[in-house]
Amino acid sequence: MHSEFELITRYFTPDPPGPEAGVSLGVGDDCTLLAPTPGERLAVSVDTSVAGIHFPEAAPAAAIGHRALAVSLSDLAAMGARARWCLMSLTLPAADDGPWLADFARGFHALCDATDTALVGGDVTRGELSIGVTVMGEVPPEQALTRSGARSGDVLAVTGALGGGAGGLALWQRGERDLAHPLLVRYLHPLPRLAAGHALRGLASAAIDVSDGLLADLGHVLECSGVGAELTPEALPLAEGLVAALGERDALAAGLHGGDDYELLVALPPEHFATAHGRLAERGLALTEIGRLVETPGIRGVALNGERGWQHFSTGGTS
Amino acid sequence: MHSEFELITRYFTPDPPGPEAGVSLGVGDDCTLLAPTPGERLAVSVDTSVAGIHFPEAAPAAAIGHRALAVSLSDLAAMGARARWCLMSLTLPAADDGPWLADFARGFHALCDATDTALVGGDVTRGELSIGVTVMGEVPPEQALTRSGARSGDVLAVTGALGGGAGGLALWQRGERDLAHPLLVRYLHPLPRLAAGHALRGLASAAIDVSDGLLADLGHVLECSGVGAELTPEALPLAEGLVAALGERDALAAGLHGGDDYELLVALPPEHFATAHGRLAERGLALTEIGRLVETPGIRGVALNGERGWQHFSTGGTS
């Protein structure tokens, strides 16, 4: 934590977190000292967002800041962990970037505040714009939501709505710049489902966040758990405005394959679904059954509507 | 922890750390789950190394891997913390980089092994070569070596030898490629002083690692502790071969101003110096008194040899 760290302290920690946030010694020494909660597990993950690959360089700076943190926090949500701390490695192209950095910090900081995450370290270097965010959270042992606990017979469900990330990116690439458009909001301001992950502790048998696309991330869960899935594709909750923006066919493809949604995909024993649904409803979040887990490996789509051509989304199995 | 993480698992965690390393759930899920030691503080830091800024892009890949981890571990050493875990964000320019990556991983992994640090997460993205390493260590409360505990009357001391980092870089830039040259070893393979930091627990009143140069890093300690320093420059332990390579004048400048040494600069109450010296000697490491701390702010050099012109290294005070 060396070069140019005064940038961090100036823009990012005007009101440094203290003991109430589990920070025994804050930014400004060789390390930050944290006080983990006794008896809990520390959940850690890192994600790097690179301009032109993970987000458009011309996106609003506040959105870039928000998004870089959101994609990392989403991994904590998918473990059922409570967010505690984060560190940021910021690589910036130019030295004269005060206004951009202030906006970036505003977006980053707002999500820190909204999720009770304390920024406890970081560094700033020069080069192509990229942001690496390490997040740390906590979860009691045995309550973590892994990818490997799903069982045949479990309900497969997803929080919120799908396809908005891919839809928003498509609109952005077509030149849409109305930042209040619901799909741009979904793409530029994804909300890590931390409260949902926490509420699903003790109920879900497995969870993952939908970052690479529903089918890809479902594939990870199936592989880790040694099961297969039968999807009910007409149940797929698509993001608001998605069909209007992309047409039905591309909207469905965005929901199945599109990345950047950061919803949670969960497996639940059937007897837990109603409770889980109720807990998320209390938090204003939908939980939609989209299929069932089965013993036979692979993903099969159940084509209730022939026009939709679900079969070519099959990625395995014998259907 | 998403894209291309199979690269990490293939090259970096062929033998994944388990419960014996405090890892409850390893790489391959949304997060890694760690078991911190009850009652200890978690020391965290992140440093990013960018090609062309922090290291020459043409340096041996194994050295780049070693060095990227070493500079982060050095921050743990400077807190007196024991290294436990690390996460790596690797940004790579090309897709076809198997041999380079295998060498890089070998250097990174060897230092993990040597320091008992478990690699517990990371991601790989495409762009200009850069490596961000987040390190996590542990230290009991009240035993952490901060920058703010130094007191007037304390002995100022440094581990090992100084100027080797800057000297090695100068040689590299002149075209020296004998990787066994002591100065190139110092520059390319800095050793984080973790054992020394641990041994100084309970003895040193303050510590910092010398990454930006002795005077710059001493300045941080003085500012944090509210004291000044009188240096005894002829006592400065210069790296082996430094005077021969650079000449006396530039060698001294490298020792005072050169970065990348990653030795520890410590303040010690005088009655603790002999014990500290003895503990480090047992570990094969020198601890050299290079001055005293005083009440008057600033750094004063004591010019015993007029030819050396120490006065122009003064950075404050009234001398």
Image (cartoon, coloured by chain):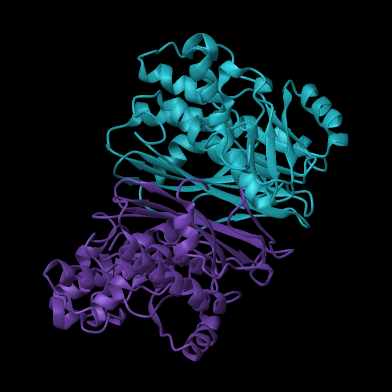
Chain colours: A purple, B cyan
Residue situated furthest top in the rendering: B244
| Residue A226 as seen in the image, left or right of residue B286 | left
Image position of B249 with respect to A26: above or below: above
The x, y position of residue A306, in whole percent, is 16, 77
Q: Indicate the quadrant containing the N terminus of chain B: top left, top right, bottom left or bottom right.
A: bottom left
The x, y position of residue B177, in whole percent, is 40, 13
Residue A266 seen in the figure? no
Image position of A312 with respect to B293: above or below: below
| Residue B290 as seen in the image, left or right of residue B58 | right
The x, y position of residue B38, in whole percent, is 77, 57
Total marks shown come to 0
Q: What residue is shown at x 31% (from left), y 64% (from top)?
A: A100
Which corner quadrant of the image does residue B116 belong to?
top right
The x, y position of residue A315, in whole percent, is 28, 58
A155 or B295, which is in the foreground? B295
B316 or B48, which is in the foreground? B316
A160 or B286, which is in the foreground? B286
Q: What residue is shown at x 71% (from left), y 55% (from top)?
A: B41
Image position of A220 with respect to B227: above or below: below
| Residue A108 as seen in the image, left or right of residue B16 | left
Image position of A183 with respect to A136: above or below: below
Residue A166 seen in the figure? yes
Which corner quadrant of the image does residue B158 belong to?
top right
